[in-house]
Image (tube, rainbow, N blue to C red):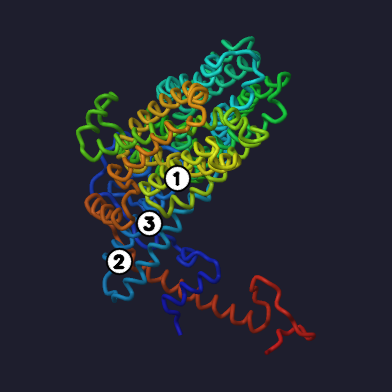
């Protein structure tokens, strides 16, 4: 008796096997896409849309799905982007499966439903395969880029502990300038980094950034006075701003779309781990005789990056933008993706070109793009929201914690450095925990809960410092404050830019957001020591007022920025694909694959029944056998 649809799906799940294994021909067995007219993309390989004999060439459903991902997912590695990638993949699988069933004749409703489920499962399975292909060139790029973000985090936290031992006797202004100089160099580095990435290539710009970190780290290590420290902090801040723009672009252009969210997560972890390491290193090295070792870490990490630089590859997207026929770009794509055949490389080149064209700005100047964005009501609201949230992120006071928590905890707990380190560890754990919330909660919801939680934490901090609670409550409140930050105001302001803006606006919106973030960062770094000195227990009061404003803004103005559902995306994709492509179902092969699938499942079921009868079936544990070696019958 042949297996029903629900039966063999259940059997596959029990066996822990993918449904696509049964589809011996993969998505090619379902059908093919061909373009009605060759896409008008400059430099697109002719073989992408036209065969050697002049007839339309075809793409399998998986190849067309990858093309859609390249067009819709920004060429940037952004923390939390996984949901958008997953939704886009699901949407394409749904629309392609619907087109496949629509093109099949003589199927009953039950057969159509079963075929749609199986087809979408096969397509999703093959689209997810990219997440399992991580080649060594990509690994080296991830490591080097992550080290840059590690140094950003490390230099955010490194000034926290050694204030009293670095050139004792300095004034509050001198130390404030040394801390804030980091944020002065940041926006300048962000602007310069984008320009260098365009003119010198992503790899070349990354090497310039590494040398800048090395120079700033050496200057800070061998500083002779506070003026030198301030200049060195400016240079390191410049390199950090450079890195904050360059690293997401570099990794986003090397990695397939399905990996860009994961790589954004890795670089974010590298940054928060950098803050924690700076706190841990302060225990042995934040002394009058060893503080230079704290600053030398930046130079050491930069040297490690330079030693690994010969293994770095240039961005294929940058090479193809300069020369669509670039052989070097094709060699790099072959290495990055682990491809074997030239026609596979040309297809991937086509994906890069199609994606690049979809996300390319029509305007050449930033002001022209801004004018275009401002002229659209929906885009204008998103732009205002992203800038307000960037201001709220910094004026919430989070970097006051990472810059000055050691001095803040003096008199609150016995060893202030312990409190600072606990905050750094909680920050790392919260960054991990938020990944689960991002898949389940709306972006606006997270911002509301984040700002509300931080607001309450600020109030508790002030009340504790005023003596209404035990002093250890202040430590708990600061940790709660950091947790709520990582749940919303930390990642969401960056994520909404990548998720909600059209691809051609992402670069400009991200640049503006970065400039606003660094400018506000500078203000907090410069002003907080004076707030702490003159406001005392009320030093977190201004941050509470800002958070109250963000909470009201989020509830009354901020749109839900979670994005469209897979069903909404599928409807749009179906319309777009129908207008630009022709889908041809492979009925003969598909029927053969269905028969092979059912035979394979029936054979698997028979084998399992035989193994259970013989007592050799693997249940995940060893069954209890009788003396004769048989499974006892109860």
Q: Is residue 163 visible?
A: yes
Identity of the residue drawn at 44% across and 50% down: 438
Q: Can residue 235 be seen in this view?
A: no
Which one is nearer the viewer's eye here, 538 or 149?
Answer: 538
In the rendered image, the vertical position of residue 111 relative to residue 192, given as above or below = below
Q: How crowded is mark 1: few (under 14 residues within 10 Å), some or many (20 or more)?
A: many
Q: For the residues carrying marks 3 and 1, which lies nearer the camera in this image? A: 1
Looking at the image, is mark 2 or mark 1 earlier in the sequence?
2
Q: Where is residue 161 drawn, in percent x and y?
A: 63, 27
Question: Dots 2 and 1: beta carbons under 8 Å?
Answer: no
Q: Residues within 10 Å of mark 3 (few under 14, many from 20)?
A: many
Q: What element carries label 3?
A: helix
Count of labels in the image:
3
Q: For the residues carrying marks 3 and 2, which lies nearer the camera in this image? A: 3
Q: Name the residue under label 1.
A: 453
Q: Could you give the CA–CA distance between mark 3 and mark 1, rounded to whole angstroms?
A: 34 Å
Which one is nearer the viewer's eye here, 543 or 49?
Answer: 543
Q: Name the residue under label 3.
A: 90
Q: Residue 374 carries which label?
A: none
Q: What element carries label 2?
A: helix
The part of the image, by quadrant, that contains residue 232 is top right
User: Is residue 477 shown left or right of residue 416?
Assistant: left
Q: Where is residue 140 drawn, in percent x and y?
A: 58, 36
In the rendered image, the vertical position of residue 125 relative to residue 481, given as above or below = below
Which one is nearer the viewer's eye here, 493 or 159?
Answer: 159
Q: Mark 2 points at which residue?
A: 101
Q: What element carries label 1?
A: helix
């Amino acid at each position: 008796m042949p297996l029903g649809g629900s039966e063999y799906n259940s059997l596959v799940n029990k066996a822990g096997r993918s449904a696509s294994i049964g589809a011996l021909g993969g998505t090619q067995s379902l059908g093919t896409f061909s373009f009605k007219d060759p896409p008008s993309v400059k430099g697109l390989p002719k073989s992408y849309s036209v065969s050697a004999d002049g007839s339309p060439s075809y793409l399998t459903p998986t190849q067309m799905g990858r093309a859609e991902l390249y067009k819709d997912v920004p060429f940037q590695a952004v923390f939390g982007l996984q949901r958008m990638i997953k939704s886009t993949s699901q949407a394409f699988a749904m629309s392609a499966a619907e087109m496949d069933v629509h093109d099949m004749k003589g199927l009953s409703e039950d057969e159509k439903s079963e075929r749609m489920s199986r087809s979408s499962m096969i397509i999703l399975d093959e689209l997810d395969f990219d997440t399992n292909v991580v080649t060594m060139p990509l690994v080296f790029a991830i490591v080097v880029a992550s080290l840059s973000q590690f140094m950003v985090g490390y230099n955010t936290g490194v000034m926290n502990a050694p204030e009293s031992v670095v050139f004792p006797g300095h004034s509050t202004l001198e130390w404030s300038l040394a801390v804030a100089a980091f944020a002065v160099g940041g926006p300048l580095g962000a602007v310069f980094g984008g320009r260098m990435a365009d003119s010198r290539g992503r790899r070349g710009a990354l090497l310039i950034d590494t040398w800048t970190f090395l120079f700033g780290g050496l200057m800070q290590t061998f500083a002779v006075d506070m003026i030198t420290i301030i200049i060195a902090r400016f240079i390191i801040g410049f390199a950090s701003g450079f890195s904050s723009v360059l690293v997401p672009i570099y990794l986003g252009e090397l990695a397939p779309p399905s990996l860009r969210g994961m790589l954004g997560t890795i670089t974010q972890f590298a940054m928060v781990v950098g803050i924690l390491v700076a706190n841990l290193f302060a225990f042995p090295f934040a002394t009058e005789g060893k503080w230079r070792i704290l600053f030398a870490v930046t130079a050491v990490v930069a040297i490690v990056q330079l030693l690994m630089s010969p293994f770095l590859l240039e961005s294929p997207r940058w090479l193809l933008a300069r020369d669509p026929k670039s052989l070097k770009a094709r060699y790099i794509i072959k290495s990055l993706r682990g491809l074997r055949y030239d026609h596979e490389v040309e297809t991937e080149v086509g994906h890069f070109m199609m994606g690049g064209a979809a996300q390319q700005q029509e305007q050449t100047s930033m002001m022209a793009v801004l004018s275009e964005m401002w002229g659209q009501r929906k885009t204008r609201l998103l732009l205002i929201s992203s800038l307000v949230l960037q201001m709220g992120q910094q004026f919430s006071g989070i970097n006051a914690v990472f810059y000055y928590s050691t001095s803040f905890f003096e008199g609150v707990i016995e060893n202030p450095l312990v409190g600072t380190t606990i905050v750094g560890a909680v920050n790392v754990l919260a960054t991990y925990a938020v990944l689960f919330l991002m898949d389940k909660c709306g972006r606006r919801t997270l911002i509301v809960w984040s700002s509300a939680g931080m607001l309450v934490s600020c109030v508790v901090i002030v009340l504790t410092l005023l003596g209404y609670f035990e002093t250890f409550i202040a430590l708990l409140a600061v940790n709660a404050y950091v947790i709520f930050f990582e749940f919303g105001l930390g990642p969401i302001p960056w994520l909404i830019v990548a998720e909600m803006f059209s691809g051609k606006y992402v670069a400009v919106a991200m640049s503006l957001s970065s400039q606003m973030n660094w400018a506000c960062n500078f203000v907090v770094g410069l002003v907080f020591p004076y707030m702490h000195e003159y406001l005392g227990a009320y030093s977190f009061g201004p941050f509470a007022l800002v958070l109250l404003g963000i909470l009201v803004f989020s509830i009354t103005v901020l749109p839900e920025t979670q994005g469209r559902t897979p069903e909404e995306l599928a409807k749009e994709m179906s319309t777009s694909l129908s207008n630009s492509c022709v889908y041809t179902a492979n009925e003969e092969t598909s029927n053969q694959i269905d028969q092979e699938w059912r035979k394979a499942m029936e054979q698997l079921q028979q084998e399992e029944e035989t193994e259970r009868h013989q007592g050799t079936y693997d249940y995940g544990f060893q069954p209890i056998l009788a003396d004769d070696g048989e499974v006892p019958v109860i």
